[in-house]
Image: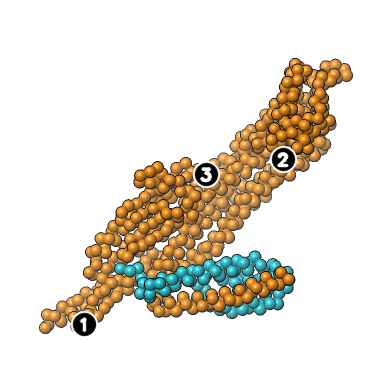
Chain colours: A cyan, B orange
Amino acid sequence: MSLLKEKVRALKERLLDPFSVDGLEKEFEELLSYVQKAEPDELLAIRDEFEEVKTLLSRNLEIISGGLKPLLREGQDSFFSRRV
Amino acid sequence: MFGASFGVISQALEIYRKSLDIYNRNVLNANNPDYVQEDPLVESFAPAGINFREVKREQNIYYLNLRNTKLSLVRYLEERSNLLANVEGIFQELLDGTGINDYANRFFKAYLDLMKDPTNQGAKNELVTSAKALSGFLNEKVKDIDRLNQSTDYTLDDAVSRANELIRKLYILNKDITVGYAQTYARGRDYKNLLDTRDKYLRELSELINVNIQEDDIGRVKLTTSKGFALLDYTDSYWQLEYAGGRLLWRSKSSPPVDITDVVESGKIKALLDAREDLSRFKEELNDIAKYLISTVKIPRENSNSWFLIQNVDDPTLALSNYGLDGNLDFYDNSTSPPTLISSITNYGSLSLNDLANAINTDPALSGVGISATVVNNPDGTYTLRIDVPLGSYSITDSGNNFFESSPVFVGNDASDISPVSTLDSDLDDLDYALTDNFSDFANGWWQSTKGYVNTLISDISDTQADVKDKLRIEDALLQSLDRRLQEMQGVSIDREFMEIMKVRRTYEAVAKIVSTIDELIQTTLNM
């Protein structure tokens, strides 16, 4: 399996957990460098899995933004507690 | 003066004791997944002393609701995957020599061997044995599917009863929360242990069926299914579900029950409802194999006195030429030497199957000697024509090579009752050796179609399972992550949590930019 394919697969696995972001940016920068050097047939081979990475990424952004929404809407006091 | 001081000290001690109670509760419930850490909020009341304001629950309601939604989805996928594993077990495709492919292959091979060597008694015996084994396998598998369907029904009954019980318990809990809130209003509002019980019930209910949860200011809940069928309306009312006739019904208070089978999206109940559909589809696919074999597989005969149109047609009202079938049928009286031509039907391709049957049945020269034609409606929905002649003295020739004296190998309506014809043994002693090459060619045609039906069934089972397992892997990882997150957040300060979420969000935003660049690069390179 090419390094590019391995990287995409590993990132797909990492994105399954939306809260695990340590070093994530760096890993995507690495992926970018692989993509820049890749041949068209290599890119073709990872296209479907890269689409899955995009889907997971947008799902995770949605989850994180969802967690922030109550805070931004109602203020910090109501964020963690059910009001009494 | 001292009296006032003692009052303050006693109040402080009472608050200290209450705070200790709350911390103890936190420690005792350290391993309870539904327990939410509580913190006593104490405020200064200078110059009089301190006051116990409220017990605060440390919980992000957004993640909790998302966790319950995902829990419902994961339970759905797990249950469905387990049931599909049972189906895989029934068909045993993974074990060599025991799957449907093996039984079908063995029968086809025996058929071809006999057509190659029609006098071979061993080949005849093997054809009978393999036909019995194949039809027996199909009978047995349909029974297994029916049994699995029945057990799914029982489990569904139980799951619906359990969901009803939880809805009723939550209704009572809503009332208890109202009372608890009123009773503890002036004493720190320490009724939140009820909310832990409530969360436990909500989690259990989510495992059974996906529900939308609305919470009021004091923690009572309103529950609806997808598309808004009410299950619980705070303290006002609750509704029950019913499982009947393979359908999930929502029992209305004032009108007949409403079928919400297609409304439910996840949870164990949805998995079981979908499993019933899966099982019914697999059974139909199994039936397709049996129906096709019954409708198609025939052997060439010397003295069956029945001529069949070997190729089945979909529409008996369409001219046969549309199916590439044409020729002249000549009917002979064999009692004379040479045989006497008693009637002919030329270019039957211009006639439909119904018209051809009619032409034979209304021909006085044919009906007068007892020759008749019947349009046979095959179990697989196709049609064929059977021409019966009186024993011994008449024969038919077809210049188009579409009608042959022959007889079917299998009888029945579907996989539940398919069996070899009772006369198969003696039928095989009456093989027309002159036609075995033709029937070998036909066999290659029906074999390809049979394999197609078998593959449809096998890939349906394995593809459905693979799809479910893939989704389960993704959703289970998210569920575990959310559970971890909810646990980690216990006792974490608001500021720290806010900073952490902002950090995660910033990382994702930075990653999104890189992904966008990668995406553009891929698009540009591949569209070069």
Q: Are the residues under badges 3 and 1 in a single subunit?
A: yes
Left-right relation of A2 to B396: left
N-terminal of the pair, mark 3 or mark 1, is 1
Please tell me whether mark 1 sits on a helix, a strand or a loop. loop
Q: Are marks 3 and 1 in contact (CB under 8 Å)?
A: no
Q: Position of residue B375 (x, y in %)?
A: 69, 28
| Residue beneath the point at 47% across and 77% down | B502
Q: Quadrant of residue B314?
A: top right
Residue beneath disc 2: B107
Label 2 element class: helix
Pointer 1 residue:
B46
| Marks 1 and 2 share the same chain | yes
Looking at the rendered structure, which numbered label has been put on residue B113?
A: none
Taking the spot 48% from the left edge, 71% from the top edge, the residue there is A64
> Comparing marks 3 and 2, which lies closer to the viewer?
3
Amino acid residing under circle 2: Phe
Hey, which quadrant is residue B175 in on the image?
bottom left
Q: Position of residue B413 (x, y in %)?
A: 62, 34
Q: Amino acid at mark 3?
A: Asn
- Measured Cα–Cα span from mark 1 to mark 2: 95 Å
Q: Which residue is mark 3?
A: B149
Label 2: few (<14), some (14–19) or many (≥20) C-alpha neighbours in 10 Å: many
Q: Is residue B508 above or below residue B130?
A: below
